[in-house]
Image: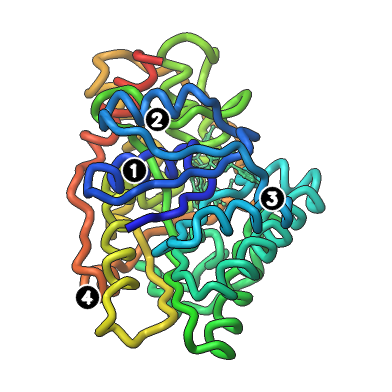
Amino acid sequence: MKILVTGGLGYIGSHVSVLLLEKGYEVIIVDNLDNSSISVLEGIKKITNLSPVFEKLDIRDYNQIELFLSKHNDLSGVIHFAAHKSVSESVENPLKYYDNNVLGFINLYNLIKERKIPLIFSSSATVYGNADSVPIKEDAPIKEAFSPYGKTKQICEEIIRDTTKSNLSTKSVVLRYFNPVGAHPSGLIGELPNGKPQNLIPFITQTLIGKINKLMVFGNDYPTEDGTCIRDYIDVMDLAEAHIKSLEFILEPKNDKNFEVINIGTGKGHSVFQIIKIFEKVTKKKLKYKVTGRRKGDVPVSYADCSKAKEILGWTSKLSIEESIASSWNWENNN
Ligand code: NAD
Ligand code: UD1
């Protein structure tokens, strides 16, 4: 089966592409290289000994995407990763985010909907905003997102929900990722943050190799045991597996569900201080850090209820936080 992976040279897309290839799918990647490098394609080829089709293409270019889809008129599914993902940049430049994440998506969705190709869409736990309780279930109320980035995910989810309601022959799975971390065990692909990292794990690895002077811990006065925020860190390899399971689910002819929203996390929370301790244990290095003020928009505690993923997809996370941190460290050293 032939699967189109948009943004397939990015962090999550590259890991999913590897697993798809290993599972025998034919993989077609489009990426405009806005936040990735062509060297990732070499990493994918080295790991799998297989060559996915790659085309440098911007999903906002309707004519090019249409031409591309007419060349590949036998697609079984689309996994859509291509989007911008920086929360702070989206606050500074909201239009850039609405343009790429919403208009770009509508462009692509129009074309795949016409062709009745099933879709797996990358959403985020950010759509929950500051949830009333944890673990967060999929039916938790969607609060106002803190950033234009979060709003683009909420908008795309609504677009997909409405479209599947009005056109029952389209099928979609929306995956709400919690905090993706880790890297492929080979150390050949991983997260390549553009400029200074904003997320905790790449910030720590870059501090440990001396690229960054010290980590700023954003607040230790939250209502948690040690005062720092708690998150659900999900390994990118487990996340990749969840995409394969979603694909199997959506391609199963007996399955008559045409729209599902599913949390992808571990169901466990770790605080910033716990993550620092695990890093120090795994790397046997001391991390330089300083506690500073809270970051605007951070929620105190976020972790997933993953029972729906288990029930519907037969998926649960397998890797421990120690294993994820070890693979992030291996990737940083290899990179
Ligand atoms: P990434 O930036 O590493 O990958 C996205 C890829 O899409 C990049 O290779 C980029 O060049 C490409 N791209 C962007 N705009 C494009 C366009 N217009 N046309 C073609 N290619 C384009 O990001 P990621 O971490 O792999 O995230 C993948 C998806 O998952 C995104 O939709 C993101 O919002 C979502 N997500 C990510 C996280 C996370 O923490 N990484 C969490 C929740 C959801
Ligand atoms: C961030 C995004 C969210 C996105 C998610 C996954 C924000 C407000 N939210 O979530 O929309 O879906 O990434 O990519 O940016 N921390 C520090 N120091 C740092 C960096 C982070 O103390 O230098 C803390 C944060 O306060 C937070 C935790 O580490 O408590 C995790 O932060 P991060 O990796 O940025 O993820 P989220 O904030 O959960």
**Residues under numbered marks 2 and 1 in contact, where contact means CB atoms less than 8 Å apart:** yes
Q: Neighbour class for label 3 at 10 Å: few (<14), some, many (≥20)?
A: few
The amino acid type, in three-letter code, at marker 1 is Val
Say which of 61 and 137 sits in front. Answer: 61
Q: Where, by quadrant of the figure, is residue 195 drawn? A: top right
Q: Check disc 2 and report the residue beneath it.
A: 190
The amino acid type, in three-letter code, at marker 2 is Gly
| Residue 4 position within the rendered picture, expressed as x and y whole percent measured from the top left | 46, 53
- Give the left or right position of residue 104, taking residue 126 as reference: right
Q: Check disc 1 and report the residue beneath it.
A: 236
Gap between marks 4 and 1, in whole Å? 21 Å
Where is 250 relative to 50, above or below? below
Q: Under 8 Å from ligand 1: the CB of mark 1?
A: no
| Residue 251 position within the rendered picture, expressed as x and y whole percent measured from the top left | 32, 71
Say which of 297 and 147 sits in front. Answer: 147
Q: Neighbour class for label 2 at 10 Å: few (<14), some, many (≥20)?
A: many
- Give the left or right position of residue 127, taking residue 58 as reference: left
Report helix, strand or loop for mark 3.
Answer: helix
Ligand 1 quadrant assignment: top right
Q: Which mark is residue 64?
A: 3
